[in-house]
Image: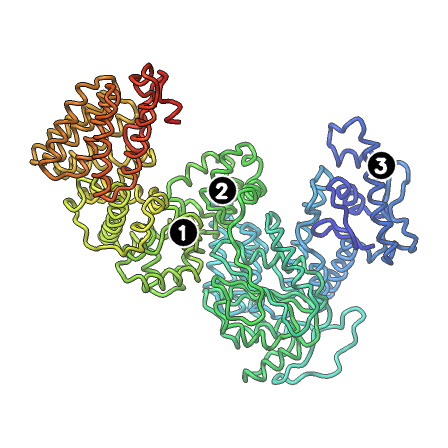
Amino acid sequence: MRFRVLGPVRMTPRTPTAAKPRVVLATLLVQANSVISTHSLIDELWGMEPPRTAATTLQVYVSQLRKVILEGTEHGVDGGADGTGQLLLTQPPGYLVRVGPDDLDLTVFESLRARGRAAYDERDYAAASRLLAESLALWTGPALSGIPHGPSLQTTAIRLDELRSEVLEQRIGADLKLGRHQELIGELMALAHEFPMRETLHGLLMVALYRSGRQSDAVQAYHRVRRTLVDELGVEPDASLKRILARVLASDPALAWNPGRVPANRPASGAAPAAGSTPAAAPAAEPSGPLLWLPPTLTDFTGRDEELARYEEVLGEPGGPNPRTVAVSGRPGVGKTALAVQLAHRATGFPAGRILLAMRDSTGRALSPHAAMSALLRRLLRPGPDVLPADPDELADALHHATRARDLLLVLDDVVSEAQVRPLLAAVPDAAVVLTSRRPLGALEHARHLVLDVLSPREAESLLLATGGSRMAEDPAAVAEIARLCGRLPLALRVAAGGIAVRPHWTAAGLARRLADERTRLGALSLGDLDVRSGLLAAYHEVSEAERHAFRTLGLAPLPDFPLWTAQSLLGMAADTAEDRLEGLVRAHLLEVRPSAAGPEAVRYGYHTLLRSLALDMLTQVDGEEAAAEATARLGRACLVRARAADARLTPGRDRLAGVLEPDAQALDAGDPAVAVPLRWFQAEAAGLLEVLRRLHESGLWNLACALASAMSGYYEACAQWDDWEASHELALDAARRAENTSAEAALLRSLGDLAWQRRHNGRAVDCHRHAARLFLLVDDRVGAARCLTGEADVLLGTGEAERAGSLYARALAVADAEGDTRGCAEARRGLALVAVVGGRPADGLAELAACEAAARSLGDGRWRGYAQRTAELVHRDLRRDAESADARPPHLEVRPGVWLLDDSPGLAADAA
């Protein structure tokens, strides 16, 4: 049996799935070969309040562990020091696990660590580096992870993780002694980023930078850690870090690299002395022992279980004609590097080593293929020759020789393009490779592709709780809101939770309030040298200027997503060109594709919430308010054209502002969704149209706002969207009054009157219709005024004043006939039909309904035709009833398509149903 505690607690070949038995196993393993009392185990399992059956339950857990161990021995796995399988023993006052020196990763780690420290003390830095790297290679994650911690395990986990950090720092110190300062910079920068307040690591980074001729970068590294310490803890760096700074500023030659100070390498324990040297032009030396050039895993790494399991299996496949290559892509901050490092630590089947190579330098510039292969070869040949082949083919041959037939895992981090890594991949066909990139590397042959998305809501909240401490756990609602505002982006979540962890006076609710404002959200997501905005900007600056302009301008698109025509109007370009811009941004992970199963548009596009904040921020900085206003106006006109086309199909002739206010500049094809499927189009775009209306109002585009609201009113009535109807029209009414546009004010008031009537706010409905009628007459719009009479009559009919209602319907019909208003005729005749039916004159009602249907047919209005036919059918059924009920008022009367006049009296209720 083999046991692991330096990462997830595991037994080979099989680990118990239940958490409690694994807690027992871990407690016994961290004190292997020693008796652990039953009392201690119970305390670890249940704390201060164990159940009454604790002792019996503990015995069950021990029995389960023994069964798993026995199964392992039956499958030929070594059963322990004596091969008997009796590893888990009962020995008063408790239990012990008996393991051999090579059976537990912790004992192997401690042995290698001791040997590495001894080699370091003896100034045998090559052996020290190798032994300490081997000890670190045993780690697959935070110590004792994957199980709940009681008091003892919690203390042990903290101690072991700190011990790992100390070993890592000593290994880096040994590598500095060997002159590997240039190769260490990438690793140290990643570590300084992960541990922004660990001063020893920052000191090592300063030395590596200084010895690489980057004195100014070393000084900047000091000031970054100082700023973090002062801002977060209110303390200055320690004396040792200040001394390094003083030596850097003084260009102290004693701090510089001096090969003469390094003693001759001694053979490591058990190693044979070198038998000659290898020419620099043809490096052929192969490293001995496993290499580990990986940053440590994040202690609070959360989620991605499915991805890790799937691609760990891919990397574990036997080598062959199909390379084991995994390409991970995704937007900035989504956790590509963290996942790759976690995957590399978990993939333990690589005895030759696991190496991470950054494919950009510290300034963000991409490494050339030659530089990347040289950096990798130097790590493989530690310390190796100082001079590598200059010829690309010779360099590729040397790299192939160094990796041939060896189980090696490479992590190529932040790859720029396929061309950057193709020569390197060709040179290492036997290695397993994990690549991370901001763009999909689709042209790579044989690669398995993983496009990494944001965390699930549950994973995002778990990460906040793991990073933010107890104050996060106190307010679950605030945690959920923070996760939403951060768009569940791992980097943003980590920064947000880190801000809570280092500021004792902050609360989760307070942080949620800070993040609520989209305009300042990115500024709030900064902690030390962790800055979400900078990470997003890096991806933004990588695309072309044309794509950057599109990224900024499309930030004005309505939420949550938008179709191609929206992009076309905002950018002011042809559809094909706009689609090219969109697809370029999708490839750069600056925009998302969101397939639409329900809407009429097959594909829609959308921003991650933080990228949209960046887009709007950059739009203001680069393009200015005038450009934003022009784009908003283009979008508003495009929305109006489509809304009017859809309204003309859905409620023909209803919109009094169509063709009068903001005349249409273009006609749509018959296949356009707004024309072909107007109701589905409205349902898909309604939320976005309302947002555009708000933005038009904010931009002072008053007439455009009025016209758009009027074009949307037919949909709002047809689908009973009362709240949006009211919100849009109150906003547009304010715009009409600001623009002093009487026609628009009248049309909007009439529509609000219809809404008030349907909500049974009869007094407001009458006031709106009468006010609108006066305004229509001021601009000599007799048709509009007559339709207001119909609206007021609808109110009167609903309150039982059928005679007054009939008089108003008749006046409205007279005006509509005289003015040729077919829509007005249909509405007035519908009203007269209802008055006749309610008054016990069904024959007259049927005649008016027939005239209403004819008018609707000439308009091409299928909704009103269907309404007239339904109502006529009800009246015919009423005529067939007996004389006693024939005069009864219909209890459920459809007074307009989809609008019912309700009453509690008996009569036509059954028919209406």
Give residue 526's position: percent from left, percent from top: 45, 48
Image height of 174 relative to 742, above or below = below
Report how many numbered discs are placed on residues in the image.
Answer: 3
Query: Callout 1: 10 Å neighbours few (<14), some, many (20+)?
Result: many
Instruction: Name the secondary structure under disc 3.
Output: helix
Whole-angstrom CA distance, mark 1 to mark 2, is: 16 Å
Label drawn at residue 59:
3
| Amino acid residing under circle 3 | Gln
Pointer 3 with pointer 2, Cβ within 8 A: no
Percent position of residue 305, x then y: 62, 51
| Residue kind at label 2, given as amino acid type | Ala
Name the one closer to the observer, 14 or 670: 670
Residue type pointed to by label 1: Tyr
- 347 lies above or below 899: below
Q: Is residue 42 left or right of residue 580?
A: right
Task: Name the mark on residue 788.
Answer: none
Q: For mark 1, what is the residue?
A: 607
Residue found 87% across the figure and 57% down from its top: 78
**Which quarter shows the C terminus?**
top left
Give the quarter of the image for residue 672.
bottom left
Q: Is residue 489 above or below residue 795?
A: below
Check residue 483 in the rendering and tell me which mark sits there, or answer none: 2
Answer above or below: position of 325 versus 886.
Answer: below
Give residue 25's position: percent from left, percent from top.
79, 44
**Looking at the image, is mark 1 or mark 2 nearer the viewer?**
1
**Could you say whether the residue bearing mark 1 is in a helix, strand or loop?**
loop
Q: Secondary structure at mark 2?
A: helix
Pointer 2 local density, CA inside 10 Å: few below 14, some 14–19, many at least 20: many
Task: Locate residue 839, reporting x and y percent.
Answer: 23, 19
